[in-house]
Image: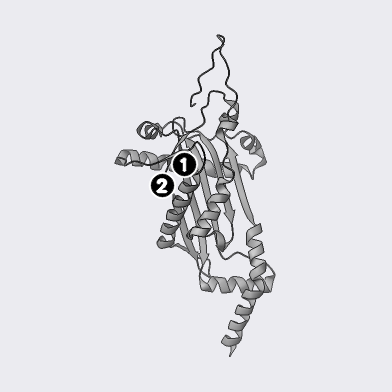
Amino acid sequence: MRVKYLTCFVITSIFLLQGCITQYNTQHCALNDTLHFCLKEEPRVKPPQKYLLLPVDVSIYEVSAGGASEEVPELSEQGCKYVTQRLTEHLKKRQGIELTQLPDLSEAEQNLLDQHVALYDRITASMDMYTQIPAFKHKLERPDGTLGSGLSFLAESTGADAAIVASGDGFVSTGGRVATTILYSVLASTLLPVSGSWLHVGVVDLKTGNVLWTNSYTIGSGIFALNKMSGATRMVEKVLDGYPDFDALAPATKTDQGGKDVQAENL
């Protein structure tokens, strides 16, 4: 009998809180958009035209009622597939953008790429941290993240000017955690999301290693799940909505003493 009443209570709570939880999830989100200073200040910088899409890395975790999390490979694979698909489609629609795929790499080249992607993760994590520390305000006003020239071999082999780096995380809840969260929300009047997603996209100059642009989007909502096509579409659109028009950002070309235009080049 107690089980029956508890079941009815949980089901009723779901319907009562559904609207509140949806509102909470859609409001508690965050965007973090950064643009390398060279694109605005350096007249010799040539905006990228051809992009190399690096393999997308998405991990989806299942969280239990006790808070333990475990990656679900099948969901992670779906997330990689859908984000790659939507990212490719979205970028190809943009005028003036040419997109190419990563060619087969030797073991040494793959290791070098992995090292630079790991370095990229560290640098962008630091850039996110700057938003929370007043002492690094100048870094937000004039972002200068760079990986160095270690990926220039990809520019030579593919002809690409810049690489697109994309990664994401998501979590879904077990049935037990959903029930526990709902009960806690009712008793404590504190709404907690039962799922969430984070997606990051960045552009790296392949010759200089400068992190030209990054944006990330975080939200606690099931409709933005990266392992679903509709959710991946929403997340990609949110992140790329801030994608800049690099040509419009480029400073006016300067002239030398002889009156000739200075040739734009990647720095």
Q: Which residue is found at the position 49% from the left and 52% from the top?
A: 168
Q: How crowded is mark 1: few (under 14 residues within 10 Å), some or many (20 or more)?
A: many
Q: Name the residue under label 2.
A: 55
Residue under the point 48% across and 51% down: 86
Which quadrant would the N terminus be assigned to in this image? bottom right
Q: In this view, does 21 lie to the left or right of 76?
A: right
Q: Residue furthest right?
A: 189
Viewer-proximal residue, 63 or 219?
Answer: 219
At x 39%, y 32%, the residue is 159
Question: Residue 28 sits in which quadrant?
Answer: bottom right
Q: What residue type is labelled 1?
A: Ile
Q: Which amino acid does label 2 sit on?
A: Pro
Determine crowd level at label 2: few under 14, some 14-19, many 20+ residues with C-alpha closer than 10 A. Answer: some
Tell me which numbered mark, 2 or 1, is placed earlier along the sequence: 2
**Residue drawn 50% across the image and 55% down it:** 169
What residue is shown with label 1?
Answer: 164
Residue 18 falls in which quadrant of the image? bottom right
